[in-house]
Amino acid sequence: MMKTVNDIPQGELKGKRVLVRTDLNLPLDAAGEVSNLFRAKRGWQTIQYLSEKGAKVILLSHIGNDIEDSMAPVARAMKKHFSLFYVPDIVGNAAREAIAEMKEGDVLLLENIRRDPREKKNDESLAKELASLADIYVNDSFAVDHRVHASLVSVPKFMPSYAGLLVEEELEVLRKARTPTRPSFAILGGAKFETKAPLIKLLLQTYDHVFITGALANDVFKARGLPVGRSRISAQLPEKEVLSHPGFLAPVDVVVEREDGQAQTKKPEQVEDGDKIVDIGPDSLALIAPYIEKANFILWNGPTGLYEDGYTSWTHAVAALTAKRFADGASVVIGGGDTIAAIEGAGIKQENLGFLSTGGGAMLEYLLKGTLPAIEALG
């Protein structure tokens, strides 16, 4: 049975060193500075709780995909909003000396854990060294809890371990998303159909209707014998049992980017060799609008188009419909960093969108399996 920080008896946190595996993998702008504090703000609830109880809070996270990436810009951004110290070390002398000097309530951020190659290898020698830094371990890093890494699945073997408040909330909401109230509607975007196929099949069993969008829709067109031009295609295409399912929905029009860079709305059968499909179109929005308007539970992961190339208008339109339904009482769960980033320009406050999960891949894996490796490690 997984225990949370709320299960730690009152008074037992005072003066204790608590190692918090959090998720501060924040997006950076072209200048290398943090552009969005969404995950940091969501995760601060646990940090604040521990600090106020008198614990010495030691934060551990990764950032980026490069072993050279540093937590320094994250520390600079967070110091503008929160009280913390930063040491560019993980388990070395600098880290140990900084921890030894901590006072009750202090918050210390360590360097990018993935700078140590033993992290991704799930090396227990690293886990033991991390465990030696503290008295208690807290996992509050839902977005990476699907990774089998040392700081996530091996550290709990060597010290008392608990789930943080963010992880507890994520699991509570996503359990409901696995058995949604009806009528229910799911929107799934992204790419790589081969990795999404098992989840799509499960969603078709548990949700009344599932709308496939993003690059996944290109695979649907291809499987139906329609032209896709120079659009991104997955290694695996949808099977007939998926395409013919009565609850399965796909775009009925698309926005394409022509070779001259101009955008144009077309029916899928009108896509030309030089076209790249970049978004859904107005008819597709009209198709799904009634399902959103009557749904009591909405699950959404993945923008409708290539938001990083500026194609966000239809994602914004879906967000507006979803926010309206949420205001009318529906449960809404939205996940994936790309989805949340794409919605940001819609002018809708985050609290008016429903529950925003910090996880992308972790959210999808939990929906499929009902658990994650790092959650299992907590017992």
Image: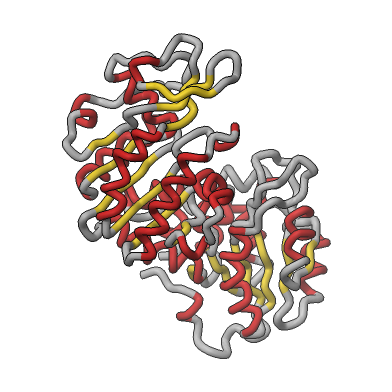
Q: Is residue 377 left or right of residue 1?
A: right
Residue at the farthest top position: 273
Is residue 57 or residue 185 the one in the foreground?
Answer: 185
Task: Using the rendered view, name the quadrant where residue 285 is placed.
Answer: top left
Q: Residue at x 59, y 58 (%)?
A: 39
* The N terminus: image quadrant: bottom left
Which residue is found at the position 73% from the left and 44% from the top? 29
Asked if residue 158 is positioned above or below residue 105 in the image, the reply reads above
Residue 101, quarter of picture: bottom right
The residue at the point 60 percent across, 19 percent down is: 261
Image spot of residue 40 (x, y percent): 63, 61
Residue 213, visible in the rendered structure: yes
> How many numbered marks, from 0 up?
0
- Kindly give the residue lying farthest to the bottom in the view shown: 11
Residue at 21% x, 48% y is 208
Q: Position of residue 185 (x, y in %)?
A: 28, 49
- Colouring method of the image: secondary structure
Residue 293 lies, with reference to residue 47, above or below; the image says above
Q: Is residue 48 left or right of residue 185?
A: right
Whole-percent x and y of residue 17? 66, 75
Nearest to the observer: residue 134 or residue 189? 189
Lateral position of residue 63 relative to residue 375, left or right: right
Q: Quadrant of the C terminus?
A: bottom left
Q: Is residue 231 left or right of residue 76?
A: left
Q: Position of residue 238 (x, y in %)?
A: 29, 26
Whether residue 146 appears in this view of the structure is no
